[in-house]
Image: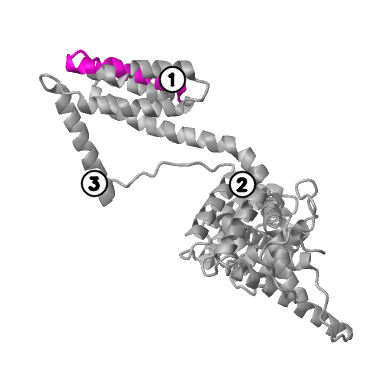
Amino acid sequence: MAAARNLSNMTLAHEIAVNENFQLKQDALSENSLAGRVKHIVHQAFWDVLESDLNAEPPEYEYAIKLFEEIREILLSFLTPGGNRLRNQICEVLDIDLIRQQAEHNAVDIQGLANYVISTMGKICAPVRDDSIRELKATGNIVEVLRQIFHVLDLMKMDMANFTIMSLRPHLQRQLVDYERTKFQEILEETPNALDQTTEWIKESVNEELLSVCETSTTSGAENSSMPSLSPTLVLNNSYLKLLQWDYQKKDLPETLMTDGTRLQELTEKLNQLKIIACLSLITNNMVGAITEGLPELANRLKRISAVLLEGMNKETFNLKEVLNSIGAQTCVEINKTLKERGLPTVNAEVQANLVGQFSSIEEKDNPVRSLIDKRIQLYMKNLLCLPSPQKCMPPMPGGLALIQQELEVLGTQYANMVNLNKQVYGPFYANILRKLLFGEEVMGKADASPPSN
């Protein structure tokens, strides 16, 4: 439970710090769900009883007074420490003891109190709630007014929470590395096997690098019985590159990357779409490039069409082969349309069929065009990880990727930022694992503050 609590806190802090769009939202129950229906019935029963009490002769104010007591506490919770004047005013107007005395003599002004509450809410609410305040002022039924006051107050609570999060974000960003590392160390002490998947993830890269070095040595004719020397940084970067081809539906992420799981999956899905678009562009250029040369607007139009049709391609129900056929047919239509507009001869049926067929073959995992584009994107991402500051200097774009350069640079920067932050937080843990895998040293109980050497 302690480890789970630490993981929850760490995940929340990480999300607030790295996700500029992170916001809390109200958890609305579906009206058709059992919980939603029960909530509606119970709430409606309360408001019906309140309306009956206020319409009685003489009126019964007990429930209404309890509501105003709760409203007062909520309003006071919105105030900053320096808001003494408004605090005193709220306590004076919503003096529950005084309201009870007035109720005993049937002299309490419920509508007047509600108007004061609405006016006060208007002073302290966010501008986005101004329309809700105006609607409250226009509502005539006092029970409905009180009901909507609580609804708007709930929204204001969420606004306040999100404002607090926004205010805390710069502080969290400054403290995030030390905070996450400390929390993960606590998790590791509570759960000693909390790095098992991370170790396997890095070990896989170590084995691949060793195999690659051995194959290179064999090819060159060199013989050396000692274990080859591997760069820890190279091994770790290759481990990160594996995340771009990760099967997020079937494989669990390494423990040290759990907090970025959703972002990594979304990035990989966008990257897969860009790969297909780059493949389509390369095939089109190879087959009809001589005809369409000098028509950049056509290439961009075909790119937009492909992007639209490839939306959702990572869903299990998505039929990639069928969509590629559709893109091929649409590409032929657009090419011939553009050629006709310029008075040029159109592409014949044989070339069109060949183009559609090559588009369709991209679906195969071992398709040579797909493999080529995949290697070039991997090379670009690998070069990106080697840069000290990707935002200031991007690596050269490999051939065949010009059409997706802008999108690839954006994704690459996001990816590099995630990796660099992850290295800062978990670098000491990775160093321990690499020492054991590469040099046979035992992993220490606590993370060593020294990063892996090159």
2 vs 1, front mark: 1
Question: For numbered disc 3, what is the local secondary structure?
Answer: helix
Residues shaded magenta: 101-125
Residue of label 3: 38
User: At which x and y percent is residue 450?
Assistant: 77, 59
Colour setup of the view: one colour
Q: Reading the chain from its start, which is encountered first: label 1 or label 3?
A: 3
Q: Is residue 85 visible?
A: yes
Residue of label 1: 87
Q: Amino acid at mark 1?
A: Arg
Disc 2 and disc 3 in contact, CB within 8 angstroms = no
Which of the pair 20/9 is nearer the observer?
9
Rounded to the nearest whole Å, what is the CA distance between mark 2 and mark 3?
38 Å
Residue of label 2: 18
Q: Residues within 10 Å of mark 1 (few under 14, many from 20)?
A: some
Q: Residues within 10 Å of mark 2 (few under 14, many from 20)?
A: some
User: At which x and y percent is residue 19?
Assistant: 59, 45
Which of the pair 342/50 is nearer the observer?
50
Magenta-colored segment: predominant secondary structure: helix
When the figure is inspected, residue 164 is found, relative to residue 207, above or below; the finding is above
